[in-house]
Image (spheres, rainbow, N blue to C red):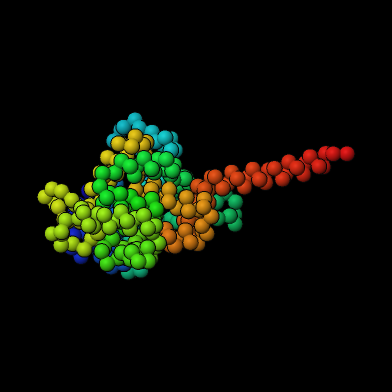
Amino acid sequence: MTAWDRCLVRGASGVAPGLGHPLLDGYLSFVAARARPNTVLATAYDLKVAFTVLDKDPLTVTTRDVLGFIEAQRAPRRGANVVRLADAEAGLSARTIKRRLASLSGLYGYLLACGEVNSNPVPTGLSARRPGRPSVPLIRVPRTLPRVLEPDEVTRLLAALRTSRDTAMVELMVFGALRRCEVLGLRLGDLRPGEHRVFIAEGKGGHQRIVPITARFFATLATYLDNERPSESSTDRVFVVLKGPRRGQPLSADGLDEILDGARRRATLAHATCHELRHTCLTRLREAGMALEAIQAQAGHASIETTRIYVHLASDRLVEEYLKTMAILDDMATEAGQP
């Protein structure tokens, strides 16, 4: 066992979490200066898991150790005989392992820049079978399409919501493609009802944007602000708790998830998460012919490559174009076969 304590300690407000090792804590402080709190906490947890498995001082880790860590992450967890339906594997998902490797690689990139190590033990990939070909990635992440709700499912979900506050939050996701954290981070000063737009001050990665929202949302929001939002609330967050000891305080992520879970059960839907509502909005916008660059701006994607997935999700348009093209090809084949 190593001499340092691998206990993840959440720091006070404005202070990065610690792991009990000066090099790791120094890196987490570096990350905290340039990333959002959730990113810092996720990085700290990834490093905690990594060095719990590696069981070595960071300065002595080798590439062989990293490959062993990957193998350990792929092993069945806690001896449970559970297999994921997505890829028929029993260990952690490829995305989770890839994220943990990225956190580990970021640490050693930092230590390399500081002169603490001579090289990064986390390889970028493995050599290809043929010379000149790109290297093979350490972890292959399967490309999966996110699930979306059908129009009647959206209608049922909205009908199952019990308050105007809950309806307004869902409308932000299903009509405006806001993320859960963006809905909860919305402040009263971010609302622009005269323009039918909202300002997203706390987007993913710290990015800000202004997005249009249907007038339907602002009508629902007005009902919530006039009739439901506690007048004694001192926070400028738009969405707050309506009942109980936390009445008037900002609604939490767990609270929003609980609201959505209850509505999903009442609507007898198999699935309807916050992110699926966002995917549903972006998919419908693409099916309606909205330009990919406009969808990128609406979604707040840093890269348009992330937005391209909605080209694949817009199945109705794809089927329409396919059938139209096949009809033309069939006519050409028929004409070619005529004497």
Corner quadrant of residue 179: bottom left
- Would you say residue 234 is visible in this rendering? yes
Of all residues, the one furthest to the left in this rendering is 245
Q: Position of residue 297 (x, y in %)?
A: 44, 62
Vertical placement of residue 193 versus 164, above or below: below
Q: Residue at x 35, y 66 (%)?
A: 194
Where residue 114 appears, as percent x and y from the top left, is: 32, 69
Q: In the rendered image, is residue 66 in sight?
A: no
Q: Nearer the viewer, residue 57 or 295?
A: 295
- In the image as oriented, which residue stretches furthest toward the top? 81
Q: Nearer the viewer, residue 335 or 118?
A: 335
Task: Pinpoint residue 186: horizontal percent, then vertical percent.
Answer: 28, 60
Total number of numbered discs in the rendering: 0
Residue placed most toward the observer, 116 or 195: 195
Q: Residue at x 48, y 61 (%)?
A: 294
Q: Residue at x 47, y 56 (%)?
A: 306
Residue at the image point whose x is 15% and y is 48% from the top: 243
Q: Quadrant of the C terminus?
A: top right
Viewer-side residue, 180 vs 191: 191
In the image: residue 242, left or right of residue 185: left
Residue 131 placed where, x, y %? 59, 54
